[in-house]
Image (cartoon, helix red, strand yellow):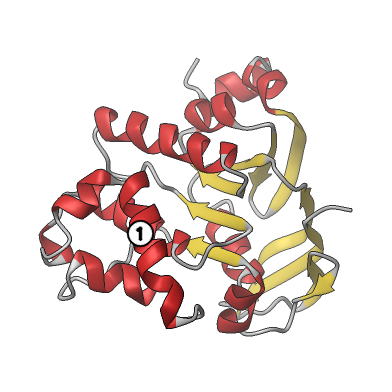
């Protein structure tokens, strides 16, 4: 049984039909990439899965449970964390305070241990733990957003455009961390416009075009697909 199943969801913004019968699944232990151009519906898909938007029809199943109508905070408690597009850190709070915000579903007695784990994942955050999050670089804020999500100890991590606006050096570093997170046992659903990087680390992938899943398959096979290379890899 898939850990996450999206079954025929339809989402509207007023009269605009944003997602058309979108269906896909993520199995435990996988990195699954969802790629597509700007405006294809990738962020809308993640927002629908995590309860920030409501589907007009269709179903979202997590670990065999229907979460289609559950609010976001209840979904986090079930073991799903979402790293939003644009990082969305709390700029006026310190790095350590931002991280603690990510542990609001956890017993207080476990927070210190989780902070230690996150600082092992992201040593740079420990160096800046007393610094205001708004003063961090873009790459450091992305690390903070990921660390904050990991503070809830999720079974599945949903990442929305983690490479956006970052230097090539930070992009490489962030993707290495995603692979390490996956190797440590966390399932990953990766939404990413940088198709080449996403497909290079994913197990499987889906292509979203104007609200429709147009293609799916093994990530490495899609990386070699001529149509994908022309449309998304600039080749």
Determine the image quadrant of residue 32: top right
Left or right: where 48 falls relative to 124 = right
Determine the image quadrant of residue 199: top right
Q: Is residue 36 visible?
A: no
Above or below: residue 67 compared with residue 166: below
Left or right: where 58 falls relative to 52 = right
Q: What residue is at 56 percent from the left and 77 percent from the top? A: 52
Q: What residue is at 74 percent from the left and 48 percent from the top? A: 28
Above or below: residue 9 compared with residue 138: below
Residue 104 location, x and y as percent?
Answer: 44, 81
Q: What residue is at 12 percent from the left and 65 percent from the top? A: 130
Above or below: residue 12 compared with residue 151: below
- Crowding around mark 1 (Cα neighbors within 10 Å: few <14, some 14 to 19, many 20+) is many
Q: Which residue is mark 1?
A: 145
Secondary structure under tag 1 reads helix
* Numbered circles on residues, count: 1
Q: What residue is at 35 percent from the left and 62 percent from the top? A: 115
Residue 60 location, x and y as percent?
Answer: 77, 68
Identify which residue, 20 or 74, lies in the foreground: 74
Residue 20 location, x and y as percent?
Answer: 75, 60
Above or below: residue 28 compared with residue 220: below
Q: Is residue 168 visible?
A: yes
Residue 81 location, x and y as percent?
Answer: 54, 64
Q: Residue furthest right?
A: 1
Left or right: where 214 falls relative to 126 = right
């Amino acid at each position: 049984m898939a850990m996450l199943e999206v079954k025929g969801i339809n989402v509207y913004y007023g009269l605009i039909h944003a997602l058309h019968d979108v269906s896909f699944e993520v199995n435990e232990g996988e990195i699954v990439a969802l790629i597509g151009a700007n405006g294809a519906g990738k962020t809308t898909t993640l927002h629908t899965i995590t309860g920030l938007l409501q589907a007009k029809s269709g179903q979202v199943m997590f670990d065999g449970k229907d979460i289609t109508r559950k609010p976001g905070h209840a979904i986090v408690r079930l073991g799903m964390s979402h790293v939003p597009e644009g990082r969305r850190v709390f700029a006026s709070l310190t790095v350590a305070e931002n991280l603690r915000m990510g542990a609001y579903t956890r017993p207080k007695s476990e927070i210190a241990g989780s902070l230690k784990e996150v600082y092992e994942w992201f040593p740079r955050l420990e160096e800046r733990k007393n610094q205001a999050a708004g003063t961090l670089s873009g790459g450091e804020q992305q690390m903070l957003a990921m660390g904050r999500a990991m503070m809830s100890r999720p079974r599945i991590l949903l990442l929305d455009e983690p490479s956006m606006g970052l230097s090539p050096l930070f992009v490489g570093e962030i993707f290495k961390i995603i692979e390490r997170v996956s190797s440590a046992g966390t399932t990953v659903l990766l939404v990413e416009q940088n198709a080449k990087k996403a497909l290079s680390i994913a197990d499987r992938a889906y292509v979203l075009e104007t609200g429709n899943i147009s293609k799916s398959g093994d990530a490495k096979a899609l990386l070699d697909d001529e149509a994908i290379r022309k449309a998304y890899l600039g080749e």
